[in-house]
Image: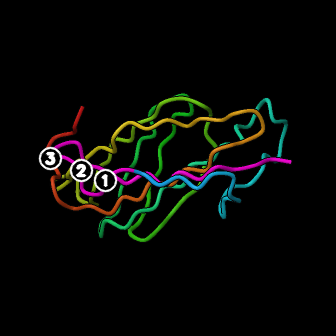
Amino acid sequence: MMIFRTLLIGAALMASGWCAAGGTWAEDSAAPNAQPPAANPSTVAPNTLTVENSSGDPVHAELIGPSAQSLDLEDNEKRTVNVALGEYTIPLRYGKDPSAYTYGKVAPFKIEQTGSTYMAATVTIDCNAGREKEPIP
């Protein structure tokens, strides 16, 4: 039996500080969007990350870490992906028009697991303040 821990990560833009601070833990809870791996557990990470876009704009999110991948999300869209253990950050690009893109970045966070307890983390991109004209390193 798999047990999931849920971590909600407040999305933050590094440019001007936090828009939503901190995180909330719910130990040993069944994660609503977390699915056990469908394939061989050694090839699919059982931990999940849900990225929710509530920013008012389309967002291109680059998940940087052990399970690197790109996500394109329309406003009010969310996507859940499987991720391996490790530290992650997510640079963000807002908008549809390349001449008007703005940029932000989610603060670093960790995906952890202990024994048969897996993590289901959620990042909500809900902040419009503090966007920069150039990508944030």
Q: From mark 2 to mark 1, how far is it between C-alphas? A: 6 Å
In x, y percent, where is residue 106? Answer: 34, 45
Mark 1 vs mark 3: give the one in front: 1
Q: Give the range drawn in magenta.
A: 1-22
Residues marked 2 and 1 touching at CB (< 8 Å):
yes
Say which quarter of the image contains residue 47. top right
Residue 16: which disc? 3
Q: Name the residue under label 1.
A: 21
* Callout count: 3
Image coords of residue 28 (percent x, y): 69, 52
* Mark 1 / mark 3, whichever is N-terminal: 3
Could you say which is closer to the camera, residue 4 or residue 104? 4
Mark 2 crowdedness (10 Å alpha carbons): few <14, some 14-19, many ≥20: some
- Rendered image: mark on residue 18: 2
Q: Which amino acid does label 2 sit on?
A: Trp
User: Dot 1, crowdedness within 10 Å: few (<14), some or many (≥20)?
Assistant: few
**Is 20 inside the magenta-drawn segment?**
yes
In the rendered image of this protein, does residue 47 appear above or below residue 21? above
Spatial CA distance of label 1 from label 3 is 13 Å
